[in-house]
Image (tube, rainbow, N blue to C red):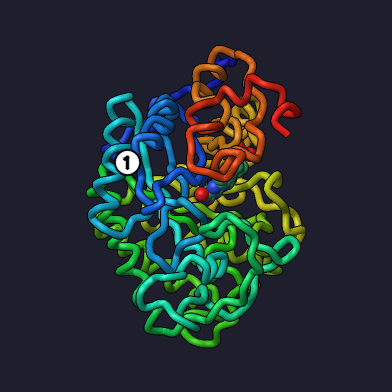
Amino acid sequence: MASSTSHPTLFSPLKLGETLTLPNRVVMAPMSRGRATSALKANELMAEYYASRASAGLLITEGTHTSVMGRGWFHTPELVTSDDAKAWRIVTDKVHEAGGRIFCQMWHAGRASHSAFRDGEDGYEGEKKLSVAPSAIKRASEAGKQRHTPRGGEVDVETPRAMTVEEIEALPEEFRNAAQVARDGGFDGVEIHGANGFLLDTFMQSCSNHRTDQYGGSLENRFRIVDACIRAVLTVFEPECVGIRIAPNGVYNGMGSDDFRESFLYYARRFSEYKLGYMHVMIGLGFGFHNKGKPMTIAELKKEFPGPIIANVGFDADSAEKELSEGGADLVAFGRPFLSNPDLVEKMQEGRELRPMLPMEYWYTSKENVWTSEGYTDLSVMDEPVEAKE
Ligand SMILES: Cc1cc2nc3c(=O)[nH]c(=O)nc-3n(C[C@H](O)[C@H](O)[C@H](O)COP(=O)(O)O)c2cc1C
């Protein structure tokens, strides 16, 4: 890759605040892989997976639940108890030994959760088992089915329950606790998940927040709980060790609001006030576009958020270099290319060909929907023709 311009390239280092230097600008995007234990703990297998990608400038983990109400995916790890911290230490130690840096993505799934995640949990019966959201608005979903429940099967998407003010006001403590567990678990920082129709995104967007109290209506009101959660996390981590992820163009989980441009420019401005390590923007349209207007760009968000911006969705080495030199991004996150190329940084730097995309049937667990290394740390499935597996 040419590096003779005055612009940073994918392989130029970047300092996040005073404490953290990233050796390159290639970020591994957060990706749920469904390999936590049945007790929802991180483990050796996950340590091996992340450590083998430690040459990334920054690794961001899969979405990690901040609470039982926040669960959104089967076999997904959590950030709730001291045992979760102990389990994550296995991963963070191995990544650090391999020379890497790793942030944990803090995730409350909101209305994309399902009561099936609370089957058999003490204290979650009847209505209390239902997922929560700012308003009781069911998310749009292909065929109305939900695939990622504890048993991996398809169940109907449910209409969530609108959160009470008391429940909303408990969220900052939930996020503070999760950040503390992440810190005790050895993470270098955390990314707050504010994208893709999960809880915080549904508060920020007008299509999913129809509240008439202090948590709905104006942009300031819709941002109120996000602000409180960020401030709670900042009592645990320095600002440069905290990132926020947004998806202003995304349609995933039924998102897309008529006022998306005005909203996300306002939110970017608000995020800039905390001097966060970065704002992570799913800017590309390859994960679905809501078509509510001209797609937003990094350049327009950069005017409101002058700090480091990570661009994501659909990049390859060439388009990533272009986004860095012309688009205003400071880093680029790669998701799917990292699944089948643990050595993505080295391959892109040496201009080597990438392995094709990992077949979807291996993304979240193995093909047989069981917890295994197949298609995860064991990529031998890639060496056989995909048809032979059908
Ligand atoms: C298997 C898989 C799991 C994902 N899980 C998450 C997740 O836990 N949190 C999140 O914010 N995005 C998640 N995403 C979205 C990715 O972070 C990324 O935005 C998406 O893959 C687009 O980037 P790419 O074009 O480089 O793959 C996931 C994507 C994939 C393919």
Element class at badge 1 = loop
Residue 277 percent location from the top left of the image: 38, 46
Left or right, 262 with respect to 182, comes to right
What residue is shown at x 41% (from left), y 77% (from top)? Answer: 124
Which image quarter: residue 313?
top right
Residue at image mark 1: 17
Residue 54 percent location from the top left of the image: 40, 27
The kind of residue on which mark 1 rests is: Gly
Observer-nearest of 290 and 271: 290
Which image quarter: residue 17?
top left
Observer-nearest of 248 and 37: 37
Work out whether residue 323 can be spotted: yes
What residue is shown at x 42% (from left), y 24% (from top)? Answer: 55
Which image quarter: residue 272?
bottom left
Observer-nearest of 231 and 364: 364
* Quarter of the C terminus within the rendering: top right
Left or right, 221 with respect to 381, comes to left
